[in-house]
Image (cartoon, grey):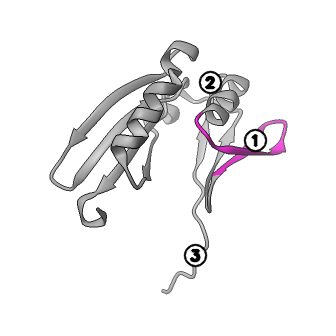
Amino acid sequence: MQHQAQSIRPFIGAKDFELSRRFYRDLGFEEVEISPEMSLFTTGNLGFYLQNAYVPDWVNNTMVFLEIEDVERFWSELVALDLPARYPGARLTPIRVLDWGKECFLHDPSGILWHFGVFFENQ
């Protein structure tokens, strides 16, 4: 089977939909409102759907990996945003160097764990 994929857009949930919408806009994503219960957030050609739906077991086990060009620069920009001070539940974890590359982490206000990383082969 050959995939002629154009994009992949996961669906993620939100404990407080309005708070999460603001969080993702502050994180630099562009929002397209689809309905009162769902928005598409994009950066370049990439995107995800944020839903006004909260199922703790689902949200607490959701992770998203976003490959970036420069993890050190991205980390500095994340720290400057001061998201944990502005959004209850948001947490940052500094850069880790692993055998495959480097990444840092951000929990959104609902508990979604974002990995922002770079693969050594792409540096």
Mark 2 lies on residue: 15
Up-down relation of residue 8 to residue 25 (above or below)? below
Q: Residue at 73%, 25% (x, y): give it.
A: 18
Q: Say which element carries label 2.
A: loop
Numbered disc in front, either 3 or 2: 3
Region in magenta: 27-42
Up-down relation of residue 65 to residue 114 (above or below)? below
User: For residue 79, which numbered disc appears in the image?
Assistant: none
Q: Report if residue 3 lies within the magenta region.
A: no
Alpha carbons under labels 3 and 2: distance apart = 30 Å
Predominant secondary structure, magenta span: strand
* Circle 3: residue type: Ala
Q: Residue at 31%, 43% (x, y): give it.
A: 103
Res. 76 image quadrant: top left
Up-down relation of residue 102 to residue 100 (above or below)? above
Q: Residue furthest right?
A: 35
Alpha carbons under labels 2 and 1: distance apart = 13 Å
- 34 left or right of 57 in image: right
Q: Say which element carries label 3.
A: loop
Closer to the camera in the image, 41 or 5: 41
Mark 1 lies on residue: 38
Which x, y percent locates residue 113?
43, 35
* Circle 2: residue type: Lys
Closer to the camera in the image, 106 or 122: 122
Mark 3 lies on residue: 5
- Mark 1: give few (<14), some (14-19) or many (20+) Cα within 10 Å: many
Q: Residue at 48%, 86% (x, y): give it.
A: 1
* Circle 1: residue type: Met
